[in-house]
Amino acid sequence: MYKSSARSPLTWFVHITVALLVILWTLPTAGLFITAIRDKDQIVASGWWTALSTSTQNVIYRAPAAEGQVEQDGAFVISGNVLEGGKGFVSAFGTSSRDPAAYEPGQAVDAGDGAKLTVEENGDFRIESAVRFENTRGMRIFYTAEIPPRFTLDNYRTVLTAEGIGQSFLNSLTVAIPSTIIPILVAAFAAYALAWMKFPGRALLLALIVGLLVVPLQMSLIPLLQMYNKIGAFFGVPAKTYLGIWLAHMGFGLPLAIYLLRNYIAGLPREIMESARVDGANDFTIFIRIVLPLSYPALASFAIFQFLWTWNDLLVATVFLGNSEETIVLTGRLRELLGSRGGNWEILTASAFITIIVPLLVFFTLQRYLVRGLLAGSVKGG
């Protein structure tokens, strides 16, 4: 029978929906990146979607004071460029904030006290007076400029060198990498035991682990911190250390890790295990030589979730590690930048984009195992 190759409306609907979801997830990242490499004045003047077009900016320029004057042909002159060497052109200017676009470029206008002001289209200005200038502050020149697109890496340079992001970046790596590896190792052993080893109370222990999946993290923060403080006081060591936050993340991540890995490992072929036992292999050998290599998709799936969680975490890091300059993580540093630099969008966008680089690398490196591991782990094994 001939089978039509035309796609059904449902198939087209699914494809269009997926494409829209991809666009919705990609646009914010693209906007963040574009904003981070734009000039700071253009970020304030227009949105990132206008990055390739000329922007109109209303700017206030402070001319040099009296010490910047020179005498030319019997007149005293203060000159310069309102664009300060940048690209673009002046479309209008003024001498008062009430009418900042009162004059066209090239006009000679009254600047007060007998002085004349001229602003050219290329930004050159000239303040001329028959008498010597005595002012201690320069004159304010209001102008409207048409600025072409400007892109720069200064925002990233400022963040990486002046804002302490480098140390916080290393602190986040110090937290995230062990907090991902340790739960995987512990959960893999526990998952194998729950899947293939017979012992009393196995079903009850598995039910307890499933129950822990729904326990809110916030409920255990204070009790855990009090326990850490008591242990630290008993041994004479500080409670807020990297070891403490590694253990905390391990505890919070173990229920999901054990459940996911147990379901995956339980679905492995029984014949492989039985053949290994016939050949004299014990449980440890089976786990190391057979189960771990076959469980790589599930391990990679959990590694993605755990790394993203620990890398983006702020609450647990604040509670168990603190906010000192030596230990503050990247998310904590961004929070401080948001508090002290609320108007510096170029700093915040560059900082935010730096934080997502590592999670993106981890995701794209391991994403091919993500769906395979999750689908295999979603079916309960025997």
Image: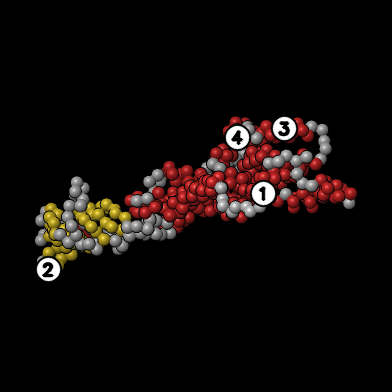
Eye-nearest disc, 4 or 3: 3
The residue labelled by disc 1 is: 372
Q: Earlier in the sequence, mark 1 or mark 4?
A: 4
Answer few, some or many: residues within 10 Å of disc 1's Cα (few below 14, many 20 plus, some between 14 and 19).
some
Mark carried by residue 207: 3
Report, in whole angstroms, how far the alpha carbon at label 4 lies from the one at label 3.
Answer: 19 Å
Kind of residue sitting beneath label 2: Asp
Eye-nearest disc, 1 or 4: 1
Q: Give the secondary structure at mark 4.
A: helix
Looking at the rendering, in which quadrant would you find the C terminus?
Answer: top right
Viewer-closest of 116 and 146: 146
Single out the residue that lies furthest toward the bottom.
Answer: 73
Eye-nearest disc, 2 or 4: 4
Q: Earlier in the sequence, mark 3 or mark 2?
A: 2
Kind of residue sitting beneath label 3: Ala
> How many numbered discs sit on the rendered protein?
4
User: Is the residue under label 4 in contact with that under label 1 (CB below 8 Å)?
Assistant: no
Please give the name of the residue rendered at 51% of the width and 48% of the height, measured from the top-left corner: 16
